Image (cartoon, grey):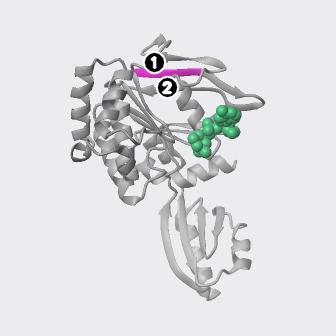
């Protein structure tokens, strides 16, 4: 069932068309990642869905009805969350609960449950000012969930975290997605591949790709040879682009990714070149293109 549907959604800031009439929908129970380069329009889109920004045009339907005030259905964690550092974690959650129209008792109860859930029970009386980045982000998640929203929207929930904090938040999201629909933006494609069911790639204010992760990556999947050289054989790399089985050559320092149309013939011919020309390789690997390769292709286009 469609939980949310955006139709022809646009946002213009002065002369900038940040979001250009996009259409997409979110199925209930799915975990959806919103991907796109800096400035693509991710935050603007998420803010419109959360009711923090008025769309310039277009509409948002929630469960098939025109949405007016979605705040009771949506929990939102901003890209740069601001906390009152002088409050304790618990005080902050109770405050957030009351802002979300829970009464004091409900807010207290929900706060305790969520503190437990995000692993902050022992730190609940400490001032937020003394929390680590990972703890703050977990508190942010608890805040967004305080009123049991139907849809949890997270704007880059892990980008400011170290690997440990990132792991913690991803684990939380993995648990939350069992009961709440999630839409989150990220630059970390690996995370998107790890936990999302569906993906939306937005580029320059337009949806470039949408669909289930499996179908989107599966349909675009191509065989690839990854070679690491001791020193880069520039002339040879230039020449292989003309081979009929090569569709793309991507060079990054001493590493080269060769995207192939045909793995069997391609692998054979490239290995033969390497031997015949005594090319100084350190590593030779065959693989498949990933979400990152697809992302690069879409964004560069
Ligand atoms: N309040 C604003 N006033 C003017 N322009 C804005 C405003 N907010 C966003 N923009 C512009 O809209 C475009 C989309 O910005 P947005 O923040 O939505 O991108 P993003 O995909 O979230 O980027 P990032 O990955 O850097 O967070 C950018 O060109 C940005 O400069
Ligand atoms: Mg953003």
The quarter of the displayed image where residue 237 is located: bottom right
Q: Is any atom of residue 202 visible in this view?
A: no
Give residue 47's position: percent from left, percent from top.
54, 29
Q: Residue furthest front?
A: 86
Give residue 298's position: percent from left, percent from top.
63, 46
The quarter of the displayed image where residue 101 is located: top left
Q: Is any atom of residue 270 visible in this view?
A: yes
Q: Secondary structure at mark 2?
A: helix
180 or 107, nearer to the observer: 107
All told, the count of numbered labels is 2
Secondary structure mostly seen in magenta is strand
Quadrant housing the N terminus = top left
Q: Are marks 1 and 2 in contact (CB under 8 Å)?
A: yes
Between the C-alphas of marks 1 and 2, the distance is: 7 Å
Residue 283 is covered by the magenta coloring: no
Give residue 15's position: percent from left, percent from top.
78, 30
The quarter of the displayed image where residue 64 is located: top left
Q: For mark 2, what is the residue? A: 50
- Which numbered disc, 1 or 2, marks the residue that appears first in the sequence? 2
Give residue 2's position: percent from left, percent from top.
42, 21
Q: Residue at x 54, y 55 (%)?
A: 222
Segment tinted magenta in the rendering:
1-7
Q: Residue furthest right?
A: 15
Q: Residue at x 54, y 48 (%)?
A: 220
Q: For mark 1, what is the residue? A: 70
69 or 9, nearer to the observer: 69
């Amino acid at each position: 069932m469609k939980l949310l549907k955006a139709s022809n959604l646009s946002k213009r800031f002065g002369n900038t068309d940040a979001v250009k009439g996009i259409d997409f929908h979110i199925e209930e129970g799915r975990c959806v990642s919103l991907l796109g380069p800096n400035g693509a329009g991710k935050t603007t889109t998420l803010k419109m869905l959360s009711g923090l920004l008025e769309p310039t045009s277009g509409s948002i339907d929630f469960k098939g009805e025109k949405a007016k005030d979605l705040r009771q259905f949506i929990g939102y964690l901003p890209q740069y969350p601001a906390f009152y550092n002088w409050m304790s974690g618990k005080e902050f959650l109770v405050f957030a609960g009351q802002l979300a129209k829970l009464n004091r008792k409900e807010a207290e109860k929900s706060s305790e449950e969520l503190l437990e859930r995000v692993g902050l029970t022992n730190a609940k009386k400490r001032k937020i000012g003394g929390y680590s980045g990972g703890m703050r982000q977990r508190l942010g998640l608890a805040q967004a969930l305080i009123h049991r929203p139907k849809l949890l929207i997270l704007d880059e929930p892990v980008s400011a975290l170290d690997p440990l904090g990132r792991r913690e938040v991803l684990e939380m999201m993995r648990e939350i997605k069992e009961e709440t629909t999630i839409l989150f933006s990220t630059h970390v494609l690996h995370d998107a591949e790890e936990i999302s069911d569906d993906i939306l790639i937005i580029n320059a204010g337009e949806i470039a790709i949408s669909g289930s992760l499996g179908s989107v990556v599966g349909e675009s999947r191509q065989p690839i040879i990854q070679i690491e050289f001791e020193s880069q054989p520039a002339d040879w790399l230039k020449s292989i682009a003309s081979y009929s089985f090569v569709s793309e050559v991507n060079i990054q320092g001493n590493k080269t990714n060769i995207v192939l149309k045909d793995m069997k013939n391609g692998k054979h011919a490239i290995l033969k070149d390497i031997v015949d020309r005594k090319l100084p390789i350190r590593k030779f690997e065959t693989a498949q293109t990933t979400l990152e390769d697809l992302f690069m292709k879409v964004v560069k286009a």
